[in-house]
Image (cartoon, coloured by chain):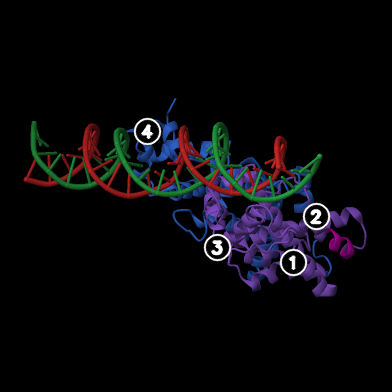
Chain colours: A blue, B purple, C red, D green
Amino acid sequence: MVTVSTSNPEPRTYHHGDLRAALLAAGLRALETTGVSEISLRALAREVGVSATAVYRHFPDKRALLGAMALEGLARLGQMQKQAAIDAGDQAFAATGRAYVRFALANPSLFRLAFTHCAGRQDALPQSDLAASMLLKNAARATGGDEVAARRYALQAWALVHGLAMLMLDGQIPADEALIDQVIDGRTLWKKGA
Amino acid sequence: MVTVSTSNPEPRTYHHGDLRAALLAAGLRALETTGVSEISLRALAREVGVSATAVYRHFPDKRALLGAMALEGLARLGQMQKQAAIDAGDQAFAATGRAYVRFALANPSLFRLAFTHCAGRQDALPQSDLAASMLLKNAARATGGDEVAARRYALQAWALVHGLAMLMLDGQIPADEALIDQVIDGRTLWKKGA
DNA sequence: CCGATATGTTTACAGCATAAACATCTATGG
DNA sequence: CCATAGATGTTTATGCTGTAAACATATCGG
């Protein structure tokens, strides 16, 4: 019941088995039902069945644990986009955008955490799995190889889907599939000067 | 030195003068140098020179105070956009977008708070001052009156600047004026299918 | 002028992050 | 095979937090 089931190779040595992974899993599970601000180290420790301060043997402080969770969130987002691109084939660019927003709507707290706690970090996450690279790669394909144009194109696309996701998460606009299409498929933006 | 100097008409009746306004001002001032998560009711009360629980005579709980601060943030953002539109003249649409991002960069915590704590509320903020309406109005002008097109255009523009602002605030991309222009002025997006 | 009401205070409590000292398990080298 | 060092977990303690309850006082309406 308290099984960990994470990717770490060591099965169950030491005292707990793999407390670090268990805490991470508990944290990610908690994020499915609450906001990041109600995440409590003590509660996670309680859930995993360990004393409150055991956490500090694996993470220097709360920020560190949240950071690890954020990294996992980023990885999952990248995975979603990659899969969406594969499934979509020729419409890959739009598909990754849609996947981006869908992931945000499906994992609101994790999505927010991922971007709040992953500023300027490059630790242990393959560059190619990042949302930005994902978009850039597809943008390059769409723009036919022009480096500068591709970069701008990717940036605009990223800002667009990120903004859409955020506005929906914050309840500023309805989190509605039709609206996503309207924004991602619409061709009107910047057709002429404004 | 502890003067309040807010818009409320009553100058200094009652015990404190206008504790509510003072707390709000202290909160907004605190947001200039720290994140919303380090805002503490007790600290604000201390700064204003009042007991910790006095806050509860004016706000039912912490959320309520943060909500009031958020509303003020939204109002200031709207004001910035309005001014930018006036100053820019014909380039009004792009100018409001730029003002949006600049406001976010200048007031990161307030900007974030405004959007996090203002879900589905319409209390006491003139609709016309909201960012969304601002954009919609200018979009309508730019698209020549087509209601549906204008709405989509506005939504895309909003998502774009909001996403750009967020990505910069979160350190995902450099908060750099040239990048803002690149995203707002660039005409490449959706010129052809993708 | 008096009583009601708005405002502010004192006291209290539970929960939080985290530090320090202590205990125990495991792995490794003699 | 065993001692010992390091990794892991626990106990205890501190000072912060939000907020509830009871109390005090200042202001205003009658």
Q: Which residue is mark 1?
A: B80
* Subunit of label 3: B
Labels 4 and 1 share a subunit: no
- Spatial CA distance of label 4 from label 1 is 51 Å
Q: How many marks on residues?
A: 4
SS of the residue under disc 1: helix
Residue drawn at 48 percent across, 59 percent down: A121
- Residue A156 is left or right of residue A191, and the answer is left
As drawn, the label of residue A50 is 4
Q: Are marks 3 and 4 in contact (CB under 8 Å)?
A: no
The kind of secondary structure element at disc 4 is loop
Neighbours of disc 4 within 10 Å: few (<14), some (14-19), many (20+)? some
C-alpha gap between disc 3 and disc 1 = 20 Å
Q: CA distance from mark 3 to mark 2?
A: 39 Å
Q: What numbered label is drawn on residue A186?
A: 2
Rendering coords of residue A94 (x, y %): 71, 52
Q: Pointer 2 indicates a residue of which chain?
A: A
Helix, strand or loop status at disc 3: loop
Q: Is residue B2 magenta?
A: no
Q: Residue furthest top?
A: A1
Q: Is residue B173 above or below residue A9?
A: below
The foreground one among A59 and C1 is C1
